[in-house]
Image: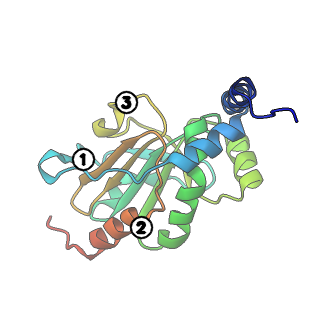
Amino acid sequence: MRKYFTKKNVSNIVFVIALAILLVPTSREWVMRQIAFSPSVSKEENREQLSSYNWNLKGTNTGDIDFETFKGKVIFVNFWATWCPPCRAEMPMIQKLYNDYKNKIVFIFVTNENKATVEKYFFENGYDLPVYDSNSTPPENFTKTNSIPASYLIDKNGQIIISKTGSADWSSKKVRTIIDELLKEKNLK
């Protein structure tokens, strides 16, 4: 009987799987989704205060907004793009979070892609997140990185509780517990 699982065959199989992960975007996204962890909460002494609420956003699939109107609310901000594999990997988890918290916290998804591209991507994947394009410069806290996805969870007092670059499991029990706690807190300002 021939040996099918020789060392050479196993290494060839591993090589083909690794190549598929690198070359096929959907497999990359799937792998990233499987290894996505809950984002870390910043230690209280390391939390940044939002530098400003002076930011205007043009709605891509929703109305225009003035970020200032969300002062005193819990806010989730995500910078993303349809062509970005880590962005695409975390999007199903963000959609789940949005489905459960859209009437409790503010969600802002920022991209510079055109409306047709966003709508096509959302239609193909069943997403209904509110997407915006910046009409003005975002708060300085959001401009420290050019990497996407970049996500921020901000409390009612403007403190950045979570600042995460790269994909994460935003629908985890940990994130939901943090949001629930933030919703219970009183606005100190």
Which numbered circle lies on residue 145? 3
Give whichever of 87, 19 is nearer the camera.
Answer: 19
Q: How many residues crowd around disc 2 within 10 Å: few (fewer than 14), some, or many (20 or more)?
A: few
From this viewpoint, which residue is outermost toward the left? 45
At label 2, which amino acid type do we have? Lys
Q: Nearer the viewer, mark 3 or mark 1?
A: 3
Q: Which circle marks residue 50 in the picture?
A: 1
In-image side of 84 versus 13 (left or right): left
Look at 64% across and 45% down and name the residue there: 30
Residue at horizontal 38 percent and vertical 62 percent from the top: 175
Crowding at dot 1, Cα within 10 Å, few <14 / some 14-19 / many 20+, comes out as: some
Q: Secondary structure at mark 2?
A: helix
Disc on the earlier residue, 3 or 2: 3
Q: Amino acid at mark 3?
A: Thr
Residue 22 locus on image (x, y percent): 66, 28
Q: Is residue 51 left or right of residue 100?
A: left
Label 1 secondary element? loop
Q: Quadrant of residue 32?
A: top right
The location of residue 120, given as percent across then percent down, is 75, 47
Image quadrant assignment for residue 86: top right
